[in-house]
Image (cartoon, rainbow, N blue to C red):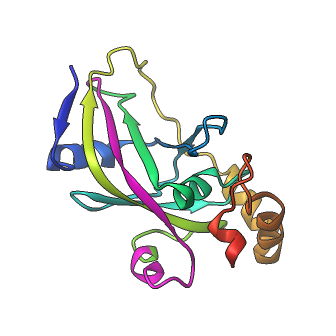
Amino acid sequence: MAKLFDCITDDLQKFIAKQHLFFVATAPLSATGHVNLSPKGLDTFRILSRDRVAYLDLTGSGNETSAHLQENGRITFMFCAFEGPPLILRLYGKGYTVLPGASEWDALYKLFSPLPGIRQIIVGEIDRVQTSCGTAVPLFEPIGQRDNLVKWAQNKGEQGLHDYWQQKNFVSIDGLPTPLGKQ
């Protein structure tokens, strides 16, 4: 059932482009640490090459992905077909965080539409591409993207977001530091 690919093929790129939602998974090295799995939307995912991807990371309640990447770099992206033929796509690799002001920031940031609450860009260097059947994934029809996070960030304003980051985004739930805490 599972198929392995050397890279993100043209057909898989087309599949990714049609998805309204993707998931990001990371984990700390500690056996007692918490695995993090986050859903993402709002047209924030980009394919940079056949083995490199990035997503625009917006301010959230935690910053687990960034903390885990700083500790060990492991990352998995997952896409599920909720419409059309069943398919699950996983992209495995090593990732890292790019903060505003970093040398890569401008080149990456221009690939995205500006959104309020931008915190960082997560880049993944993909070393394994795998599909599976997805026949148990239910069919859903998208109604649209929620605008709650965008409105929340607009209401916070720039200083409010920086204050929030200090309170909620400098350390993971397991106590790991995040790159934001080094600014």
Whole-percent x and y of residue 48? 30, 64
Q: Is residue 163 left or right of residue 154?
A: right
Q: Residue at x 65, y 37 (%)?
A: 34
Q: Residue at x 32, y 49 (%)?
A: 17
* Quadrant including the C terminus: bottom right
Q: Residue at x 59, y 37 (%)?
A: 35
Nearer to the camera, 171 or 79: 171
Q: Is residue 119 above or below residue 124?
A: below
**Is residue 17 rendered to the left or right of residue 120?**
left
Residue 97 screen position, x and y as percent: 51, 66
Residue drawn at (66%, 63%), measured in percent from left and top? 178
Q: Say whether residue 149 is left or right of residue 13.
A: right
Residue span colored magenta:
85-108
**Residue 92 part of the magenta-drawn span:** yes
Q: Is residue 179 above or below residue 107?
A: above
Q: Specify the quadrant of the image occupied by residue 49.
A: bottom left
- Inspect the magenta stretch and tell me whether residue 143 lies in it: no
Res. 77 image quadrant: top left
Quadrant of image for the N terminus? top left
Lateral position of residue 94 relative to residue 179, left or right? left
The mark total stands at 0
Q: Nearer the viewer, residue 67 or 114?
A: 67
